[in-house]
Image: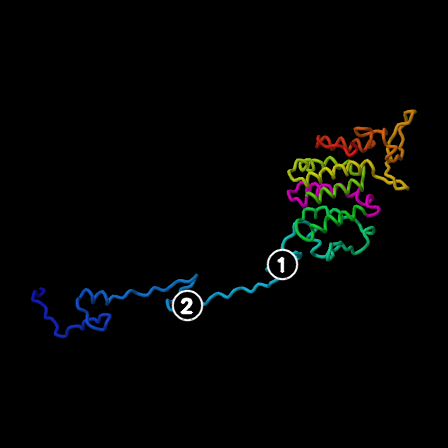
Amino acid sequence: MFSTAPRATSTNAAPKPLNSRGGTSSSGKSGSAHSKLSPVTPRKLGTGTLASSTIAPAAEPKSTKISNRSIPKAILDLGAGSHKTAFSAAYSKGGFPCRLEHGSVKHKISWSQPVSTLSYNPLFITLMEGLRETKHPFLFLVPNALKELILSPNARSKIEPLLAQSVPPLRNALSSKEKSTILAALDTVHSLGTCLGAGLLPYLAALLPPIALHSHSRDSVIKDAVIACLQGVESGIAFNTTSSDGAECKRVEVQSASGAKEKKVVNLGEWIGVGGGDRGVGGTDGAEALRLIKSKIPTYSSVFG
């Protein structure tokens, strides 16, 4: 059985807690309030946990070169990253026979050998794929390299066998949404018409649909480029040879008085009334080129008026 007698209290009482001024607490409530101190919670900085007495060092500012702040990056690091086309990949590895020379006023292309001695296969096809490049130095290099190849002596005999492989990448460039790519592709088509003449006629129908889309562009620069391209192609197909005295001429098919058809070289002055075109100008090839163009762009006006 448990005892019900009251317990004896000890004569040695516990000392009273000190208050904040060093004296004893006047009441039990105040003493208990001061005796319970709130624990110090550590302060979190970033991902680590530091005590309240620890001060994090200030982050040192990154040093930036003056050239990096004021001058934009103009030269592409050719060897880094993925490449958009086969041309940029070949150029970055040094497998292309041309380089861009930076001048104080304008740039120019330096070839490892004379352009007339170069083999166009697969050089010409790879450059056609490079028309879709949108970074420096390809924006300048590709269109100008193509123009130099097209305007080179005896270029027609080298380009005509490669047209079947060159037209698909050229059509892809014409279908681009980048303004620089569209303008470069239109200029290339213009140059091909001047160089190949009637040799471009079998492939003209494949190139006209994307050109027709840009003829309705709201950009006046693109619209003007489309008109210049089409008129250049039409006149190039019509006038694709040059006589010994430098006059523009064309070997056209005419019908003699006896009814026999024969090839005859005529200059621009003699061409009127030979056949083709809306006003009897342009020969049979010029008339076919005009028919193809008008079938895709009905509002097109012939270069012959």
Where does the image place residue 243, in percent across and percent down from the top left?
89, 40
**Looking at the image, is mark 2 or mark 1 nearer the viewer?**
1
Is 57 left, or right, of 31 in this rendering? Answer: right
Judging depth in this view, the residue of 29 and 23 nearest the camera is 23
Disc 2 residue type (three-letter): Ile
Marks 2/1: CA–CA distance: 39 Å
Segment colored magenta: 152-181
Asked which quadrant contains residue 26, the reply is: bottom left
Is 20 left, or right, of 238 in this rendering? Answer: left
Q: Residue furthest bottom?
A: 12
**Residue receiving disc 1:** 71
Are the residues flagged by discs 2 and 1 in contact, CB closer than 8 Å? Answer: no
Q: In percent of the image, x 84 and y 29: which residue is there?
A: 275
Q: Could you tell me which quadrant the C terminus lies in? A: top right
In this view of the protein, can residue 299 be seen by the observer? Answer: yes
Dot placed on the residue nearer the N-terminal end, 2 or 1? 2
Q: Which mark is residue 55?
A: 2
State whether residue 199 is above or below residue 105: above
Element at label 1: loop
Whether the magenta-drawn stretch holds residue 174 is answered as yes
Is 161 left, or right, of 22 in this rendering? Answer: right
Element at label 2: loop
Whether the magenta-drawn stretch holds residue 175 is answered as yes
Disc 1 residue type (three-letter): Ile
Q: Which mark is residue 207?
A: none
State whether residue 85 is above or below residue 212: below
Where does the image place residue 234, in percent across and percent down from the top left?
78, 36
Where does the image place residue 154, in percent across and percent down from the top left?
84, 46
Q: Residue furthest top?
A: 258
Q: In percent of the image, x 89 and y 33: which residue is there?
A: 264
Q: In percent of the image, x 9 and y 64: which residue is there?
A: 2
In this view of the protein, can residue 165 be seen by the observer? Answer: no
